Each structure stands twice: as C-alpha cells, then as structure tokens.
Amino acid sequence: MKLEDINKDSIFKVPENYFEEFPDKLQERIAETRKGKAIPIIPLRRIVQFAAAAVILFFTIYGLIKINDQPATIDQMLSEISTEELINYLVESDMSTEELLADIDISIITSNEDPINDEVITTDPIDEKIIDEILDEYEIEMQYL
Amino acid sequence: MQEEKEILLKIKDPASRNHGFNLLVKSYQQRLYWHIRKMVLDHNDTDDLLQEVFIKVWKNIDQFREDSNLFTWLYKIATNECLNFLKRKKNKYHVSIENASNELYNKLDNNPYISGSEIQIKLQKALLRLPDKQRLVFNMKYFDDMKYEDISKITETSVGSLKASYHIAVKKIEEYINLD
C-alpha cells in the first residue's frame, strides 16, 4: 500500500463550539495576567496528579517511620550487649573452641580492611615460635587459618 | 498579506489593540490548533498549548518585526511549544521515549475526539515511530501541503535537509503500514 492510497481527512475531532468559544476564553486569561494574577501554567489535572503523588509520598514516609519503630534487628540488639556480657555467656555455655570457630566465617578473622595495618602485618616479621606458642595457647589448628 | 498588515496596524494602536489581537486569534486559531493537535494528539493538551502560544504572542507582539511574516512567526512559536511539550513529557518522571510514544499510541485507541479508519489510525501510529522533528516536517508537508521554503523558515532547516527528511519519513511509514 502506498501513502497516497490513504484518506487524508483528519481523524481528530474538537468539542462542539470550541473555536467559537476559544477567543473569549483566551481574552479572560489575558485579562487575568493584566490584573497581575498568576496564569495557571499547571492545568488542574496536573495539580491533581501532584496532589496524588504527595499523598503517596506521605504514606511512604509514614510507613518508613513505623518500620523504624519496630523491634530492632538481631545485629542492633547484639550491639547493645557489652563484650564482657557476651564473653561471660560463652564461658557459661561450655562451648569448645572448635564449636565456636565452626560457626564463624573464617574471612572475618583473616581479613583486614585497613591498608595501614596490612602493611604493618606484611612488613613486620614475626617469629614462628611466637606464632606456635599463640596457636598452642588458643588451641587453634592451622587449617582454620 | 493585506489581512496581516491590517491586523498588525490595529494591534499597534493602543485604542484598537484588543480588537486587533482578537482578529489575529480568530484568523490563526484553527491553523495553529491543527498544527499542534497533529503533534500532541490530545485535545486538552492542544487547548493548553494553544493558549500558551497566544499568550506568548500577546506578550511579545511588540518585538515582532514588520518585515517578517506573521504566519511564519506564529508557526515558529507553536512549533517550539509543541516540541518543548513533547520533550517535557519524555523527561517527566524519567519516562523513556518508548513509554512516551506508548502513551500517545493509547490516545489514538481510546480518545472520544479521535475517530478514523483502521488504516488512518495505523498511519498515525507509524508517524509516532518517527523522531518528533521528522514527524513535524512530515505533517506540514503531507497534511498541510506547505511549501518546503515555508517549512524551512519555521524550522530553520535547509530545504535540502527537509526534502531528505520527508523522503526518509515516507519510506519508513510505508514500510510500517505494509507490515503483516
């Protein structure tokens, strides 16, 4: 099919008397500007859209506040317990060193994110005897490191 | 041209300024309305933009140079308003170009002020696949039968580029309407 085969008549319609009424409607708006009134650049339906967005935003923020009011997470609760209390609990629980280490991510012990400390560790030679003594003392096997 | 001169003379005289402007609105409202409507499709959007165009004309009519063509000047303002409106629509809420086109597609299917044959609607959908400026050029040439020289003044684009743009647009549209 070629373009010229298509009927060129407009498919768009206008409300009845639109062009008859338009000049008066425009004159009214211009009169408002001359009186110093602000022209409503944002049409009413856009204002409704903005109002709807504001309501959604309000409830989102309200919801977030409510979530924050809820009981703290395990990490937050643990951070409120002192190290001393935690050690006492672990001593009383009679757990062996192996049992404790089994649940610990080994990367937490071995990784060091501080580049300055990294440098200290790698440049400061440690006597192997001292390492062995520490390992024996804490019954840590080499496989964990 | 004579009509343009009479309107401008009336607008220049403070005593007949309102009357002159009213004549200008009545003379050009339909042509500008259809020029805008073909780009934004929706009647309410067109109505908003047409008011904005005439308010801009009212505020800036003193800056209009008499050696220029009033018709070209008005079309230029309307064209800028249209293109800015479409740009804003695409930027608003970070809507992608595809989604903005989809919104216009939907207007073609569900609008009480749009009714045409299946192939006419398909032609409009094919037009929505063109970049806005190419669609504008196509509308002015194909539907309004305007001269390339006049389109060139409005769009500030060379006649050669406009001819190439129109030729490519026709090829793209015919490809689309002949699909399936």
Image (cartoon, coloured by chain):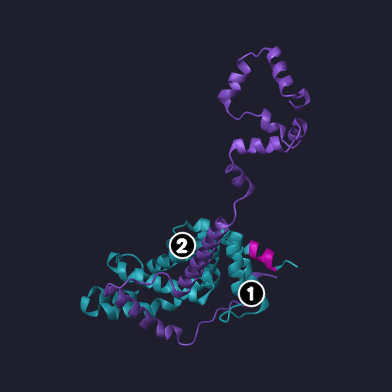
Chain colours: A purple, B cyan
Magenta stretch holds residue A13: no
Q: Position of residue B161 (x, y in %)?
A: 52, 56
Q: Residue furthest front?
A: A92
* Residue B133 visible, this angle: no
Type of secondary structure dominating the magenta stretch = helix
- Residue at image position (62%, 20%) is A121
Q: Position of residue B169 (x, y in %)?
A: 60, 62
Report which quarter residue B11 is drawn in: bottom left
* Residue B76 visible, this angle: yes
Disc 2 versus disc 1: nearer the observer:
2
Residue B87 relative to residue B67: left or right:
right
Are there few (<14), some (14-19), or many (20+) residues within 10 Å of tag 2?
Answer: few
Report which quarter residue B138 is drawn in: bottom right
Are there few (<14), some (14-19), or many (20+) residues within 10 Å of tag 1?
Answer: some
From the image, tell me which residue sits under label 2.
Answer: B84
Instruction: Tell me the kind of residue under disc 2.
Output: Asn
Location of the C terminus of chain A by quadrant is top right
From the image, tell me which residue sits under label 1.
Answer: B121
Instruction: Tell me the kind of residue under disc 1.
Output: Ile
Residue A5 relative to residue A144: left or right:
left
Closer to the camera, B142 or B85? B85
For the record, the magenta segment spans: B172-177
Q: Position of residue A133 (x, y in %)?
A: 71, 16
- Residue at image position (59%, 46%) is A76
Q: Chain for mark 1?
A: B
Q: Tell me the CA gap for discs 2 and 1.
A: 25 Å
Closer to the camera, B157 or B95? B95
Q: Chain for mark 2?
A: B
Q: Is A135 situated above or below A95?
A: above
- Per the image, label 2 sits on a secondary structure element best described as helix
